[in-house]
Amino acid sequence: MRTVGKEASHLQLTLRFGEVIIDAIAFSMGYLVNTLTENAIIDVAGELLADEWNGSRKLKLRLVDIKLHE
């Protein structure tokens, strides 16, 4: 997990759902980098996107909400 963007305002992270691993981006949620731990269990809401970069295409999750699992 790391912050990205001009002012480090976005959060980029890798999520694991059982055996499935997917990259995710949370716009304007960079402040969470100090709240979440590397192995935190979280609940997320988001949208799957086809991400294209340098001629490569893969699925990515755009997060709209993140909270620690209770």
Image (cartoon, grey):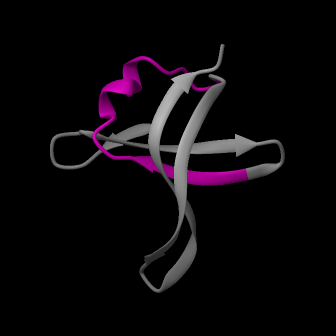
- The x, y position of residue 52, in whole percent, is 46, 77
| Relative to 69, residue 63 above or below | below
Residues 68 and 3: in front is 68
Residue for point 30% across, 26% down: 31
| Relative to 59, residue 7 above or below | above
The single residue placed furthest to the bottom in the displayed view is: 55
Residue for point 64% across, 19% down: 69
Residues 14 and 44: in front is 44
Question: Quadrant of residue 53 in the image?
Answer: bottom left
Residue for point 16% across, 48% down: 6
The single residue placed furthest to the right in the displayed view is: 19
Question: Which quadrant: the C terminus?
Answer: top right
Region of the chain picked out in magenta, as a range: 21-39
8 displayed left or right of 63: left
23 displayed left or right of 53: right
Whether residue 35 appears in magenta in the rendering, the answer is yes
- The x, y position of residue 65, in whole percent, is 46, 36
Question: Quadrant of residue 16 in the image?
Answer: top right
11 displayed left or right of 69: left
- The x, y position of residue 11, in whole percent, is 38, 40
- The x, y position of residue 14, in whole percent, is 58, 45
Whether residue 28 appears in magenta in the rendering, the answer is yes
| Relative to 30, residue 48 above or below | below
